[in-house]
Amino acid sequence: MKINYRHNVMNIQSVTTFARIKGGYNNGIRDVYFIRLLGGNESLKNEVIYVDNMLSGEMISNKLLYKRVAKLPLYLQDNESNYYIQCYDNWIVSDKKKMIIHSTENNELFALTLGGAITQTCDKYMQLKKGTSDSIQKNFVIKMIWWMDFVFHNWHTKWNEQSCIKVIAENVSKVQEYLFYYLLTLIGADVLMLQNRQDINICDDLKKLSKENVVGDFVEWCLPEFECNKNNNNSYDKNINNNKSVVNQEKIIVHIPERKRQTHNINSVSNAQPACNTTSRRNTDKVRVTNQLSQSNSVPVQVSSNSINTAKSRREKSFEELALLASSIVMIEVHNKLGDVLGIGSGIMVGKEGYILTNHHVVNKGWYYCVRIENDKEVYRTNEVIKYNSVMDLAVIRIAKTLSPLPIYKGRNKLVRGQKVVAIGSPLGLFNSVSDGIISGFRVMDSVDVIQFTAPISHGSSGGALLNMYGEVIGISSAGIDSGQNINLAVPYDCINLFIQGFC
């Protein structure tokens, strides 16, 4: 029987009321609550701690699931990403009807309910983000199911349509997080958002999904970290270890090469804009000091002549000169198991020992790849994916050939709107087409910073180079908005530098 969810049939104005109310279930209709409490005070803070203890005790007795979430995790590890990509692919194969993840294994009704809830939530996201690419939609769904396992990771009771699930979320600020909590209500969870600092900044149509109640002025206080009874076993971790057979054996050979030791100062910070979500960056533009200071610090600092020569040789290039750099940009044909071409993308040479950077969405469905290089008649076939990250939409593959890598920009100066750029890629299979334009803005897509630019690109350009006028890679073309004119996006250079450490 299909379950329908009816939201907020009663007005809930306190945390205690939220904790005690149990949504009814009759004739296939389940009552759920999606509440935003705005503001706060010390009384509310103490009330939350009381509810923590009360609901934790009920969870230990397997009467309900309760979790208070201070912050959802940001990034998937590569080994986790592999699993959830397979879950996503299986969901697509099921015509978006059944989502099987750790939390829904051996529970057909839960898998079907979650599959439908994901579809409904994804539709709302696509309405909000009109014109987004398939890869952005895929990343959104993968994030939703990963967070789903995060919430359900220590629950022993089998889910059913009458399960009591309580989730309190603290200071939700991002659209994707808000939609995740809405997704929880579509599987029967009651969700309370504690917005003590500020309300979430989203469109009115999305805000209407939840019920708003003001309980005080906005305040800056932090709740103690939620800890359930330590006698709870972490069944989710056990599932991860015991269910390695869930994911089919990878068709792509993934190699992790030994990384070269870094010699940069890890305490120096890049001034590059836009910035990736990282805790530290290396500023590799500082001139390398060749003579160390003596113990008395009396020896003056000297600069290597190589660095001076490099600085002098850095000059703006003509469009004709930039077009010659196409010899370091490749076209990638993606093949399935039968040898059919699934699609075409582009790639950038980033390491002499055969390393090529491209987008994750270019390679993620391939069985093997054929790489074509300008002025080279040989076609290089490979199935080696060295590294990938679905959040940043980056991947590195390797071919058996010595390459001429392109220089990656190191953040000498901030990128600015209006700055001239050149894009090189293989749109629609037109090998190494060159186009020019400007940087038109800096955006945040799915919590990742991107460069918006006007140089025309099309399908097949993904993975190609976005160059500044010095011939340095400032971004990798990743998406375009078809409904607009020359609204194109690129993953920025600081993400690239972080991602390819050890391959250059």
Image (cartoon, helix red, strand yellow):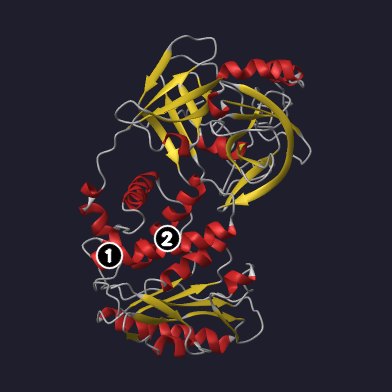
Amino acid under label 1?
Answer: Asn
Query: Is residue 331 positioned above or below 297 on the image?
Result: above
Residue at disc 1, secondary structure: loop
Q: How many marks can you see?
A: 2
**Percent of width and height locating residue 24:** 35, 87
The location of residue 313, given as percent across then percent down, is: 74, 17
Rate crowding at label 2 as few (under 14), some (14 to 19) or many (20 or more) other CA atoms within 10 Å.
Answer: some
- In the image, what residue occupies the spot 43% across and 80% down? 6
Which corner quadrant of the image does residue 434 belong to? Answer: top right
Which amino acid type corresponds to the residue marked 2 in the rendered image?
Thr
Quarter where residue 272 is shown: top right
**Residue designated by label 2:** 119
Q: x, y (%) of residue 472? A: 66, 26
The residue at the point 71 percent across, 15 percent down is: 321
Q: Is residue 138 left or right of residue 484?
A: left
Residue at 64% x, 67% y is: 203
84 and 216: which is toward the camera: 84
Residue at image mark 1: 234
Instruction: Give the secondary structure at mark 2.
Output: helix
**Above/below status of 214 relative to 318:** below
- Between tags 2 and 1, which lies in front? 2
Q: CA distance from mark 2 to mark 1?
A: 29 Å
Q: Is 302 displayed left or right of 52 in the figure?
A: right
Discs 2, 1 touching: Cβ within 8 Å: no
